[in-house]
Image (cartoon, rainbow, N blue to C red):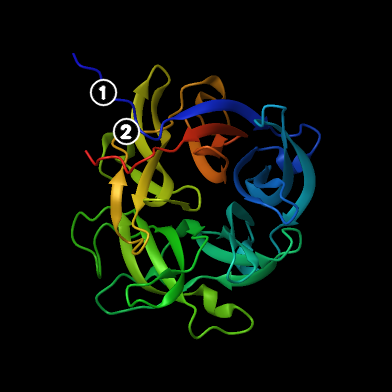
Amino acid sequence: MIAAPPEPFAMERLGIIMEPDPDDPREAWGVLNPGGCRGPDGAYYLFPRLVAEGNFSRIGRARVLFDDAGNPRGIERLGVVLEPQVRYELSRRGGGVEDPRVTYLAPLGLYVMAYTAYMAPRPQVALAVSSDQIAWRRLGLLRYATHPDEPDLNAVNNKDALVFPEVVPDPRGRPSLAIIHRPLLPAAGPGTAPHTPSETIWISYAPLDAGSPDLGHLTHMQEHRMLMAPEADWEALKIGGGAPPVRLPYGWLLLYHGVSQQQSAEGVHRRYSAGAAILALDDPSRVLYRSPRPILEPNVPYELQGIVPHVVFPTATDQREHGRIDVYYGAGDEAIAVARLTVPAQLPQSK
């Protein structure tokens, strides 16, 4: 039997860099799924989801510490930057601000955080902005333009949102803020064909040509497109966005997660793995490449065990020198780990 060729975007684990503080009740149910971005001082900062008992989530801030070889070796906690405070983040059963993804958008001179606002029973995507990564101003929930022949994205669960780090053209050619997100659509209904996968990756745009000084226009999404649906066995149940896209010479690198159902000695369970896709630079709604196999899947104890076992969930990247990208990911929904991704020199061939 001929072995399959190695996956072009395969990753090398570097280990855990953040675990729950046993003395902090705000982290009793895990630290996971961080946003990440270089700060104004050039240091790399993580924005971990801190989960208290009852699944009540806050967003923290931590500086990544590096060893002499330049590898991440740990973190310095710097407190909480966002916690549930406004109506769409709170409910009688708790609430939460979850799974942040952080991008520096140079044309605005601002850091943009896309996060999941959990107001039971329906999670939704919200945005916040900051000039220093410390003080964050909420812009509110995303609102989606509706059309009679399309699903109403305002009426469904939505999460796993990522903001592109550059202005990109929308389908009409307008300079726009582009956001990838994962609406939970009915299996069949208005605007969807029978047997349409319900949890797929979409892209929407907020045109910048008629912007408002308060930046509220950034939450008004238009020109929605389904970007990717489950294809391979390792992502058969559902897929969703991972880390914000990274510009490469041949396209936007999008890390995403896929979920499958697995049978093991423990019984039937869900397995979260990571994949890679390349989107066209001039039209990010066009997929040029997609990894046929996972580039990282749960295989070591800190991924196979945890609050939710069998999980790797990439949410942040740090583009280093010599074609290296550090990928930060949630491990077992309990801790944060990092792996090194080596970028292929050329666009891989699609299988």
Label 1 crowd (10 A; few <14 / some 14-19 / many >=20): few
Residue 90 figure quarter: bottom right
Task: Indicate the amino acid at tag 1.
Answer: Ala
Q: Position of residue 235 (x, y in %)?
A: 33, 39
Image coordinates of residue 103 in percent, x first then y, are 58, 58
- Residue under the image location 46 percent in, 22 percent down: 299
Would you say 285 lies left or right of 109 here?
left
Q: Residue at x 71, y 66 (%)?
A: 131
Mark 2 or mark 1, which is nearer to you? 1
The residue singled out by tag 1 in the image is 4
Per the image, label 1 sits on a secondary structure element best described as: loop
Residue 226 position (above or below residue 21): below
Packing grade of label 2 (10 A; few <14, some 14-19, many >=20) is some
Q: Describe the element under mark 2 as helix, strand or loop.
A: loop
Disc 2 to disc 1: CB gap under 8 Å: yes
Q: Nearer the viewer, residue 149 or 349?
A: 349
**Where does the C terminus fall, quadrant-wise?**
top left
Upstream in sequence: badge 2 or badge 1: 1
Q: Is residue 272 above or below residue 81?
A: above
Q: How far is mark 2 from mark 1, CA to CA? A: 10 Å
Q: Is residue 159 above or below residue 290?
A: below
Image coords of residue 138 (percent x, y)? 66, 69
Residue 127 appears in the picture as rendered: yes
Q: Quadrant of the N terminus?
A: top left
Q: Which mark is residue 255?
A: none
Q: Amino acid at mark 2?
A: Arg
Which residue does the image show at 55% across and 44% down from the upper left?
317
Q: For mark 2, what is the residue?
A: 293
Residue at far top of view? 1
- Residue 144 visible somewhere in the drawing: no
Question: Where in the figure is residue 255, as x and y percent of width and height?
Answer: 44, 45
